[in-house]
Amino acid sequence: MRDDSAIQSDEDVRLMLKVKTGDRQAYTQLYQKYVPVVRRYLARRDMHAQSCDDLTQEVFTRIWHARARYRPLSPLKYYLLGVAANVQRESRSRVGNHLALDTRHLECLPDAKRASPPSRVQSAEQIQAIRTLMTKLATRQRQAVELVYLAGLPPDEAARRLGCSLKTIHTHLYQARRKLRGLAHLSE
């Protein structure tokens, strides 16, 4: 184990200490550096691609919200992966406790027109249920879902149309899926 002075001098820890003070630029640097690391960690632990993306966003959302409580007791990578393990454990627990809205329905919506008649009816019912739930989303979340899942645009094109960054689109989609899952659970 490293001594405290070595941990304090770690460049990543210094970056996280800036994040702790609310430095958004430092957070962006941390995010860009560690998103691939966290996502790979989650993927190795048997996660689907969509779940990995959602959980990765959740990890960094938690890090931002809990930044004031950060203490440099170990290298930053271990801290981030510890948060990722907790997020993943909680996610598995939630999925085991109730049925969530399957985001594969959202991903297949653009192809609903090409489906056979019985699946078109099912897709139409799914689309109507999702559209009803979507009225409860924040405007930007709803717009992101409509552009990416319903209109079939790639996220970078949706970002361009909404005048925001690709990272922002991914955040809106993550928040929308999370809220839709919660709303779907309440309507069961």
Image (cartoon, rainbow, N blue to C red):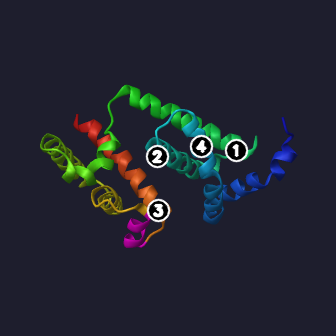
Query: Which image quarter is the C terminus in?
Result: top left
The x and y percentages for residue 152 are 32, 59
Residue type, numbered disc 2: Asp
Q: Secondary structure at mark 4?
A: helix
Image mark for residue 77: 1
Q: Earlier in the sequence, mark 3 or mark 1?
A: 1
Above or below for 139 versus 115: below
Pointer 4: what residue? 40
Question: Is 89 positioned to the left or the right of 123 in the image?
Answer: right
Q: Which residues are magenta?
A: 156-163
Q: Secondary structure at mark 3?
A: helix
Residue type, numbered disc 3: Thr
The x and y percentages for residue 25 are 63, 65
Q: Main secondary structure of the magenta part?
A: helix
Image mark for residue 30: none
The x and y percentages for residue 185 are 29, 36
Task: Tell me the crowding category of disc 2: few under 14, some 14 to 19, or many 20 or more residues within 10 angstroms, Cα based.
Answer: some
Q: Report, in whole angstroms, how far the alpha carbon at label 1 lies from the one at label 2.
A: 19 Å
Q: Residue furthest top?
A: 96
Pointer 2: what residue? 54
Disc 4 vs disc 2: Cβ atoms closer than 8 Å?
no
Say which residue appears at 64% left-offset and 51% top-offset. Answer: 34
Out of 54 and 1, give the one closest to the viewer.
54
Q: Secondary structure at mark 2?
A: helix
Q: Report, in whole angstroms, how far the alpha carbon at label 4 lies from the one at label 1.
A: 13 Å
Image mark for residue 168: 3
Q: Report, in whole angstroms, how far the alpha carbon at label 3 lies from the one at label 1.
A: 24 Å
Q: Earlier in the sequence, mark 4 or mark 3?
A: 4
